[in-house]
Amino acid sequence: MQFLFWCAQEHQDIRMPEFCSLHSMLWPGVPMVWVSTNSSLPWLVLELPTISAALQICARSISTKFCVQLWAEGNSINLCLATLAIFPFGEHKKLFSKESSYKIHVESYMKKLSLKEKVSKIENITCLPVLGSVNLKDPEVTFAYMEFSGLDNNHLSVEPSKVMFGLLVGKGQRDRISKLNIKDRKYIGNTTMDPQLALLTANLAQVERGKVVMDPFVGTGSLLIAAAELGGMVFGADMDKDTLHATTKPSRVGVKERNKDESMMANFEQYGLASKFLGVVVADFSQGPWRRSGWLDCIVTDPPYGIREVITRTESQQYMLHQLVMDLLNFSVEQLVMGGRLAFWLPVITQEYSDQDLVPTHPALRLVADCEQVLSCHTSRRLIVMQRVEGEEEGDMARVSSQLTEYKNKFFLPLAEKKAMSKDCT
């Protein structure tokens, strides 16, 4: 069966890795069969054995808006309807019985259709042998009609270039983004991560019920909240005791003092996740108190870059970004169980990262994904995902380019150049 996953057009570079991670987590060792993989389009198509399998992906996917069992498609409305006309409806008699109420959901990418236009498109679908009554509020069966007219809002084709039809089988987990939104969260800081990115990070780390998840640079706990939301048992560490105890200056505009009930635990209680929170430890990551034992299932983290949060350690000498990443990889090899995953964010100068091979490596860590989030015209950050595998472990085996440390020095470079040019002009 072919299943179309209609996705939000956000963080497209993370979309396919998310599906790959979910598939390998749900069905280890089973090959993934792609039908359509163009990440610039708002949909992906997968070959799956059952509707139940599609629903398992829907139950975790943050990228997915809804999922459709694909019945017909074509490069025009007429071609799609012609394909639909020869679909074996007899194999799905239950869907079309008198007892089954239904509706047809119309989705048009980049085009806002009026109610009249939607009704017109539905009335064109004359081959659907429905006998039940229409129920727009709570139908037992929902069909989906989808149109695509291009990616450029200023140059959309008059007629759709792609039309698809099928049975809507489920929805993704976009509601979790709203549930965990930062605006209503009890305790936040300067670097609290967007809930969508935090949930995507947890999915790529293959967090699931019962797994032990750690964030060694926990901050206000945004990544741990996402991991707990997906079933993980979470705990963290950070050197900044003020952040852990919520005694820092408030981050919200116009707020001068924090409320007395602000805390990391309050966040978990707010979302009904207190039972998943194992606690936090004040610790210098470069001299951590952890035994080398291989007991963590997942490590998810967004280390400090030296821009909004400084990179520090208890010793007086400087702690450079590349040294931090090196320690993180070595730590992950020591603490992850075999097959466990490390997912971390790394800031880079886009051109330098593209031109040179600057991906950190370790013999006992296999690179699973390297996704980009564009920050500016010259900077981005990478979501790097690695899996613990058999390999050399003794000594500091991580290989990390010292060039990564230049990110802080070059971050404000274009702004400095603009100021210099404006001074020259005057």
Image (tube, rainbow, N blue to C red):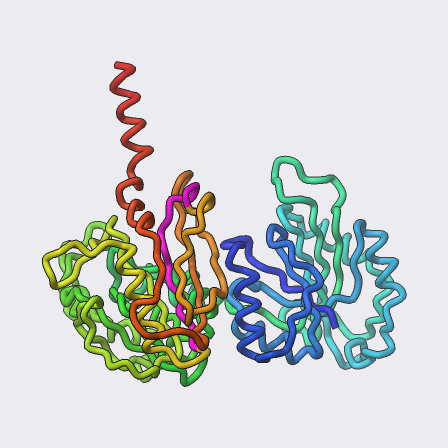
Residue 331 locus on image (x, y percent): 30, 71
Residue 272 locus on image (x, y percent): 35, 79
Quarter of the view holding residue 73: bottom right
Residue 370 locus on image (x, y percent): 47, 58
Residue at x 88% of width, y 58% of height: 82
Residue 6 locus on image (x, y percent): 62, 61
Residue 272 shows in this picture = no
Query: Quick one: quadrant of the N terminus?
Result: bottom right
Measured along the vertical axis of the image, is residue 296 above or below residue 424? below
Residue at x 31% of width, y 41% of height: 411
Residue at x 44% of width, y 65% of height: 385
* Range shown magenta: 340-352
Quarter of the view holding residue 169: bottom right
Q: Is residue 349 magenta?
A: yes
Q: Is residue 226 magenta?
A: no
Measured along the vertical axis of the image, is residue 319 above or below residue 262? above
User: Is residue 405 or residue 63 the one in the foreground?
Assistant: 405
Query: Quick one: quadrant of the C terminus?
Result: top left
